[in-house]
Image: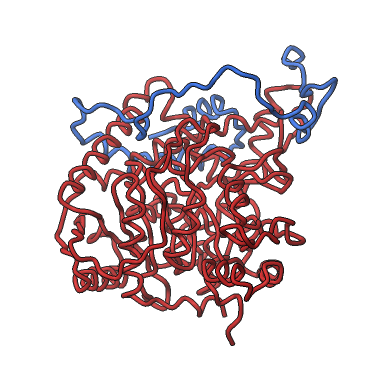
Chain colours: A red, B blue
């Protein structure tokens, strides 16, 4: 049976504008599904539709959206998946959230995530893991796993997440939806609870590429509250390309061969052939420093995190554990109880990498690797319009499978992590199933190439013809 | 690669209280991760400039003008303890020896 839940967000907005669908009814239909969520995708669900949902003339026409828990939402719990921020209700909203609300989006809920976005499975949440709607014994990926699972399961039409090393693209891939990490600076970071400030970027998680373009259109723009944000150079229009004539795709040997599961590689190669059928020219390229991306990332991101997370000390907000009248004991006990084990591990790693005697060998070298990775991409884009890779080396793994081995977990980010190190935009689109589970196809473009990236992704999406309705059943 | 004494030193810098079991596990796990990270020491990076940030912008300035901001009440609203319009914490001078 076909109902409003079967409409994409763009279709729903159009139906509301033309009078065929009532925004309040749509909100309530999703609200009921989200409230009955058995995937633990949500950390908070609205009790009723916000008043602006009635504004059907606005571009987003009252269509509901969900935001990852780490987006500050005024008066609404914003916990970043951490017990140290349990029931924290900020006095203001993140710019990305506020812009979507101003465009007529209605906040339906906040979604579960790895604590402070540190993880690739959403198992590191202080509020329990989220389950993958394709197979509830498996993880949805992470760290934006709640957003990805909620969109895939049809508990919300679309959602926003954040990507630091792959946290939008990898869960999108593992849940069979579209995830886009914009160019660094395209979307304001104001009001995003910070993980690694030189890498963090907000972006859409959606059912299809058209929805990703529509949501992104209303997220981008320079913000006086984020001095690293930049004006987006052109409007983001709905994608329309059905061919890839004249488009040159580079396949980096380092990110498409060794370490990629055979079933994932098979899906990848099939889609590369499909792109050729659509008129693209495809050739091998090289990103010689990309294999060192993980090492650089797992120094830079924890180093920045160790500084960003210094603010959680039990003084101004969040948890406080009594230190028996001793200020230092209050700090150390609050942080010991409030942070989970992965967050502690990364704070320790980052503090170590920045500490006297180790700075040059670790953090300093990692920053140089970052320069080399950005250079590799620049050289590739002299010959190619886009670089394509699998999004994740494997399909969704089972809950608990990688929890005891941090590096095995970090390897999930192998194909996604070089991209934010270079500040580039990339999209993951559903690329069929392997072992009955979704696989992602990643397209990476030069800075601020999102309109072209979305067009290319749209053409490939139409040719693949992926059907994600099974996860919404 | 990282021993227990180093873990204790770094935990002190990071203001984290770790129990004995956590210290041992942290030493083991961090050593394991650093073993993979060490691979970047094989690269020749002598002439390479570091990248701290990918966006090529200079520090933007705004007009030095009054703007609306959070009220004192809003700023204190989520605090675990307040007194006389400020955040209340144990006195740093009153720490036991």
Does A320 appear above or below A178? above
Side of A382 relative to A408 (left or right): left
The reply to whether residue B21 is in sight is no
Residue A293, percent from left and from top: 31, 44
The image quarter containing residue A264 is: bottom left
Q: Tell me if residue A246 comes above or below residue A446 in the rendering.
A: below
Residue A302 visible in image: yes
Front in this rendered view, residue A297 or A383: A383
Question: What residue is at 41 percent from the left and 50 percent from the top?
Answer: A235
Q: Residue at x 78, y 21 (%)?
A: B86
A450 and A131: which is toward the camera: A450
Residue A108 in the image: x percent, y percent? 66, 60
Left/right placement of residue B31 relative to residue A309 reads left
Q: Residue furthest bottom?
A: A1
Percent position of residue A444, x then y: 30, 53
Counting from the top left corner in percent of width and height, residue A131 is at 56, 66
In the rendered image, which quarter is residue A366 located in?
top left
> Farthest top residue?
B93
Q: Residue furthest right?
A: B84
């Amino acid at each position: 049976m076909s109902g409003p839940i079967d409409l994409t967000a763009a279709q729903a907005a159009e139906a509301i504008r033309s009078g065929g669908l009532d925004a309040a009814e749509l909100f309530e239909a999703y609200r009921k599904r989200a409230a009955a969520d058995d995937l633990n995708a949500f950390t908070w669900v609205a009790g009723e539709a916000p008043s602006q949902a009635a504004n059907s003339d606005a571009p987003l026409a009252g269509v509901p959206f969900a935001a990852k828990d780490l987006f500050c939402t005024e008066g609404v719990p914003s916990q970043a998946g951490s017990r140290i921020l349990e029931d924290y209700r900020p006095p203001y909203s993140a710019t990305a959230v506020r812009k979507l609300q101003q465009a007529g989006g209605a906040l339906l809920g906040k979604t579960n995530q790895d604590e402070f976005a540190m993880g690739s499975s959403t198992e590191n949440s202080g509020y329990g893991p989220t389950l993958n709607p394709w197979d509830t014994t498996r993880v949805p990926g992470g760290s934006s796993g709640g957003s990805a699972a909620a969109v895939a399961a049809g508990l919300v039409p679309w959602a926003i997440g954040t990507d630091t090393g792959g946290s939008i693209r990898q869960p999108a891939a593992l849940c069979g939806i579209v995830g886009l990490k914009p160019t660094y600076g395209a979307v304001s970071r104001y009001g995003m609870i910070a993980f690694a400030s030189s890498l963090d970027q907000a972006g859409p998680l959606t059912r299809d590429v058209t929805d990703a373009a529509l949501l992104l259109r209303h997220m981008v723009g320079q913000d006086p509250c984020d001095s690293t944000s930049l004006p987006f150079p052109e409007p983001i229009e709905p994608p329309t390309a059905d061919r890839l004539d004249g488009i040159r795709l580079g396949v980096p040997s380092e990110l498409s061969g060794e370490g990629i599961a055979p079933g994932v590689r098979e899906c990848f190669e099939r889609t590369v052939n499909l792109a050729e059928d659509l008129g693209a020219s495809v050739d091998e390229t090289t990103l010689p420093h990309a294999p060192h991306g993980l090492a650089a990332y797992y120094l830079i991101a924890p180093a920045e995190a160790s500084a960003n997370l210094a603010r959680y000390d039990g003084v101004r907000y969040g948890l406080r554990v009594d230190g028996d009248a001793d200020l230092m004991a209050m700090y150390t006990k609050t942080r010991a109880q409030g942070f989970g084990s992965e967050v502690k591990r990364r704070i320790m790693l980052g503090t170590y990498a920045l500490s006297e005697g180790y700075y040059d060998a670790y953090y300093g070298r990692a920053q140089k690797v970052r320069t080399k990775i950005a250079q590799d991409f620049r050289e590739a884009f002299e010959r190619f319009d886009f670089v394509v890779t699998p999004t994740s080396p494997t399909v969704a793994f089972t809950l608990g499978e990688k929890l005891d081995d941090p590096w095995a977990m970090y390897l999930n980010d192998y194909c996604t992590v070089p991209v934010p190190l270079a500040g580039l935009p990339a999209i993951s689109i559903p690329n069929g199933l392997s072992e009955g589970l979704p696989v992602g196809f990643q397209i990476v473009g030069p800075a601020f190439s999102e309109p072209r990236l979305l067009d290319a992704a749209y053409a490939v999406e139409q040719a693949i013809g992926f059907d994600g309705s099974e996860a919404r059943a | 690669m990282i021993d227990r004494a180093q873990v204790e030193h770094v935990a002190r810098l990071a203001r984290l209280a770790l129990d004995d079991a956590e210290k041992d596990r942290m030493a083991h796990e961090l050593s394991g991760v650093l073993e993979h990270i060490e691979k970047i020491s094989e690269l020749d990076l002598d002439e390479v400039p570091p990248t701290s940030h990918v966006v090529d912008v200079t520090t933007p300035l705004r007009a030095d003008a009054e703007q609306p901001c959070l009220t004192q009440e809003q700023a204190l609203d989520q605090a675990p303890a307040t007194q006389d319009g400020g955040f209340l914490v144990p006195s740093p001078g009153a720490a036991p020896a």
